[in-house]
Amino acid sequence: MITVTEQAKERAVLLMKEENRPEGSFIRVGVEGGGCSGLSYKLEFDNVLKPGDQQFEDKGVKIVVDKKSFLYLIGTELDYSGGLNGKGFVFVNPNASRTCGCGESFSV
């Protein structure tokens, strides 16, 4: 399962509203090769399910991840860090053995 913190939920709901996302939109989370640690996170809004997608809902926020990425993201929490030194959305991934300084890439 992939979960979201209250801060991430509030920010995602606000962004979806600001971007006039259609009813049924969700957060699509994924992993792709690249970044300074080997794997990078992908995060976007979507409203079209693809074959093999895994679906979760936490705190009223729907999260979708493709089957391949799910293997790297099991148990991950999506957080949001704002403020002067905030990074935006942050992945707290228990499967990552190493992460880069910016938190946007990882290795297992």
Image (cartoon, helix red, strand yellow):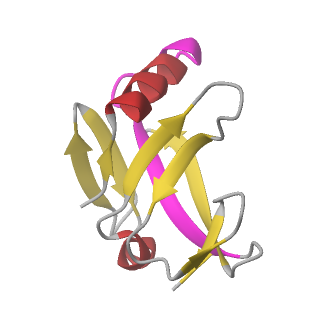
Q: Position of residue 84 (x, y in %)?
A: 71, 26
Mark yes or no: residue 49 visible: no
Image vertical order of residue 97 relative to residue 69, above or below: below
Q: Residue at x 59, y 57 (%)?
A: 42
Highlighted magenta segment, given as a residue range: 17-33
Name the quadrant containing residue 22. Answer: top left
Q: Residue furthest right?
A: 36
Q: Residue at x 77, y 75 (%)?
A: 36
Would you say residue 34 sits in the magenta stretch? no
User: In the picture, which quadrant includes the N terminus?
Assistant: bottom left
Q: Is residue 60 left or right of residue 107?
A: left
Q: Position of residue 50 (x, y in %)?
A: 40, 59
Q: Is residue 30 left or right of residue 70?
A: right
Mark yes or no: residue 99 visible: yes
Q: Residue at x 40, y 23 (%)?
A: 10
Q: How many marks?
A: 0
Residue closer to the observer: 20 or 14: 14
Q: Residue at x 41, y 29 (%)?
A: 7
Image vertical order of residue 64 relative to residue 79, above or below: below
Would you say residue 25 sits in the magenta stretch? yes
Residue closer to the observer: 78 or 44: 78
Q: Position of residue 97 (x, y in %)?
A: 50, 83
Q: Residue furthest front?
A: 85
Image vertical order of residue 10 relative to residue 68, above or below: above
Q: Position of residue 75 (x, y in %)?
A: 29, 66
Image vertical order of residue 18 relative to residue 5, above or below: above
